[in-house]
Image (cartoon, helix red, strand yellow):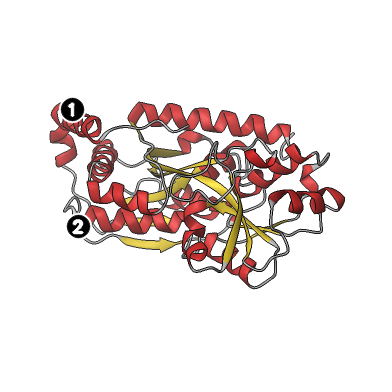
Amino acid sequence: MFKKTTHIAVAAVIAAAFSVSGAHAQSFKAENPQCIAPSNPGGGWDFICRTTAKFLFDLKVIEDSMQVTNMSGGGGGVAFAHVTKERNEDNNLIVAASMSTSARIAQGIYEGAEQDDVHFLATFGAEYGAIAVQADSKYETLTQMMDDIKADPRSVGIAGGSSVGSYDHIKPMLVAQKAGLEDVTQLKYVSFDGGGEAMTGLLSGSTEALSGDFSEMLGFLESGDIRIIAILAPERLKNFPDIPTAKEQGYDVVGANWRGLYMPAGASDEAKEFWSNAIQTMVADEGFQQTLEDAAMAEFNNFGDDMYQFVAGSIEDITKLSKEIGIIQ
């Protein structure tokens, strides 16, 4: 599912980048760098910014510590609008991105935004989606939940850490579609501003289930607060063999979410080069890779032209999927 780039290959890419245009990249120096997480604290976007900030500083890629700013709203739309309308030429700003970012562009939720409105820097991790319930929930299996949803789509509230139409929303819609629900737009999806708030919604009992990414749920799984009734992976995870896949329960759905960063499109070429090289240096670090592994994320690297083509393909795929399940016409 995920394209892996070895540490050796990444190092080679970095060396090539610096040899061709290193002088330009080195002429730029980040000052008061900032990473925007388009959600409240907790969840995947917040994890990306805080992890990036830590490793770039620890590796001395940046001299100033990086400020992490949480800017929730609109499934990332508030942050996207802030970057494109107010800080389009900011050389010191990067923003956490994911499958939901390309989904919102595909669906036109960002006020007609296009891929080129920002500069996508890289992907460096990917993870599978999951569906969770409280530890004492009556739902022991995904099939039990889907049976109730087919009988009454509004009977099961499913929390997600992003807005309606986001990837957190799309994942359970795909499962419901495979379960035979004729109109999957009737699914009761409850939007929260980030994975942390969505988890609170589940644990408080305001929803019956949670759709998110596995890494966001891991701590609560280990503490015994939740039970994951399905992982949206092609096969069971090696380190969590007790968690069943949706596929083995009769719902052939694989939901993988990439993680990465973008920056303002109007930033200087030197700044874009600097941040691209900085991220590749971070990705090549063994400590960073261990952090991804500990968070149940797979290595998934795209840089430069590969990143551009990957995002374009992601937007195209989400556009097709959103039309198929009725999110857009």
267 in relation to 164, above or below: above
94 on left or right of 101? left
Total residue callouts: 2
Residue at position x 40%, y 30% from top?
Answer: 3
Residue at position x 73%, y 60% from top?
Answer: 157
Residue 90 in the image, given as x and y percentages of width and height: 34, 49
Residue 213 in the image, given as x and y percentages of width and height: 53, 51
Q: Could you tell me the amino acid type at mark 2? A: Asp
Residue at position x 61%, y 47% from top?
Answer: 166
Quarter of the image where one finds residue 104: top right
Residue nearest the viewer, comparing 225 with 174: 225
188 in relation to 24, above or below: below
Residue at position x 54%, y 51% from top?
Answer: 242
Residue 311 in the image, given as x and y percentages of width and height: 47, 33
The residue indicated by pointer 1 is 16
262 on left or right of 163? left
Task: Classify the position of the C terminus by image quarter.
Answer: top right
> Do we see residue 38 in this rendering?
no
> Do we see residue 214 in this rendering?
yes
> Is tag 1's residue or tag 2's residue first in the polypeptide sequence?
1
Residue 114 in the image, given as x and y percentages of width and height: 53, 35
119 in relation to 317, above or below: below
* Mark 2 crowdedness (10 Å alpha carbons): few <14, some 14-19, many ≥20: few
* Mark 1 crowdedness (10 Å alpha carbons): few <14, some 14-19, many ≥20: few
Q: Could you tell me the amino acid type at mark 1? A: Ala
Residue nearest the viewer, comparing 266 with 141: 141
Q: Name the residue at the right extreme.
A: 151
Marks 1 and 2 sit apart, C-alpha to C-alpha, by 23 Å
* Label 2 SS: helix
Residue 58 is labelled as 2
Residue nearest the viewer, comparing 175 with 196: 175
Quarter of the image where one finds residue 309: top left
